[in-house]
Amino acid sequence: MNSNRKMRDAGVSPVVGVMLMLVVTIIIAAVVSAFAGGMGKTTEKAPTVSMECRIANGGTWGSSEFDCAVLGTSDAIPTKDLKIITSWTARDGTKGGGTVVGPNSTFPNTRTHSGGGTQYNSPLGFGPGVGITMSTGSYYPDQSYGNYSLVAGTHMHNVPYGYLPSYGGYGVSVDNRFNYTFGTAYQTDDVDALQAILGDNWETLRQGDIVELRMFHIPSGKIIYEKDVTVGGQ
């Protein structure tokens, strides 16, 4: 009987050994494959940016604005590689936010009927990294978001339009402060610059409200700027 048991044990041992070798081989192959796959992938390094941002709703077109002044960057950052995301809750409970990507020449995010019709991508660029700029009026394509780069000294800036009664009359009289009206300039399909950035009903924001502002770098998949901006007024 003992001799039979020894024969059975002797027959089992080689099988177990082969199985163990196969398992080890498979594990090693999986590790090597994973390592090789990781070596083949390159993750783009996210740039860095430092900015000072201001968001205001003072009840009039002239006292309301979105402005980000770039203090410095690790490299020039094309805005076509950036997504701006805003979210907020106004004190009256209204919730909102917007998303900005560029370029989008087919359907710009800012469309008004004033001045014969204006279309561009907000936020507009001014200063270094932008190219040809115009302070007011018909802005150059270089200034549309997605067509310029962020470097030290770049400004991203917009105000809502409607500075005369014939152009919407935003805040030009006491009875329409903080209100938009549909007139010569304001049509039902208009999107003003601050609406393009902050989303619908942005005019419900008041001084002291908080807007969460984030800048997402698309190639690296990382957020490179995040700030809770307190809304200012006059």
Image: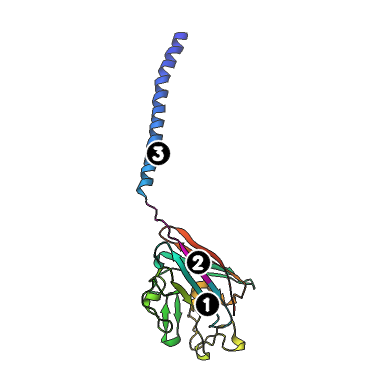
Q: In the rendered image of this protein, does residue 24 appear above or below residue 227?
A: above
Q: CA distance from mark 3 to mark 1?
A: 54 Å
Q: Position of residue 72 (x, y in %)?
A: 45, 66
Task: Give the labeled residue for mark 2.
Answer: 85
The spot of residue 186 in percent (x, y) is 50, 84
Q: Is residue 42 depicted above or below 5 in this figure?
A: below
Within the magenta stretch, is there residue 126?
no
Task: Give the camera-side residue of 77 and 84.
Answer: 77
Disc 3 residue type (three-letter): Val
Tag 3 residue:
31
Q: Which residue is located at x 41 percent, y 56 percent?
A: 45
Give the label on residue 65, or none.
Answer: 1
| Amino acid type of the residue tagged 1 in the rendering | Glu
Look at the numbered discs 3 and 2 and tell me whether their residues touch, using CB distance below 8 Å.
no
Tell me the quarter of the picture where residue 104 sits: bottom left
Viewer-proximal residue among 200 and 115: 115
**Range covered by the magenta-colored residues:** 42-53
For label 2, the SS is strand
Query: Could you tell which of marks 3 and 2 lies nearer the N-terminus?
Result: 3
Q: CA distance from mark 2 to mark 1?
A: 17 Å
Decide if residue 208 is on the left or right side of residue 199. Answer: right
- Give whichever of 189, 152 is nearer the camera: 152
**Looking at the image, which residue sits at the far right?**
92
Residue 211 bears which disc, if any?
Answer: none
Hey, what amino acid is under mark 2? Ile
Q: CA distance from mark 3 to mark 2?
A: 39 Å
Q: Position of residue 9 (x, y in %)?
A: 44, 16
- As helix, strand or loop, the secondary structure at mark 3 comes to helix
What percent of the width, then of the height, locates residue 204? 59, 76
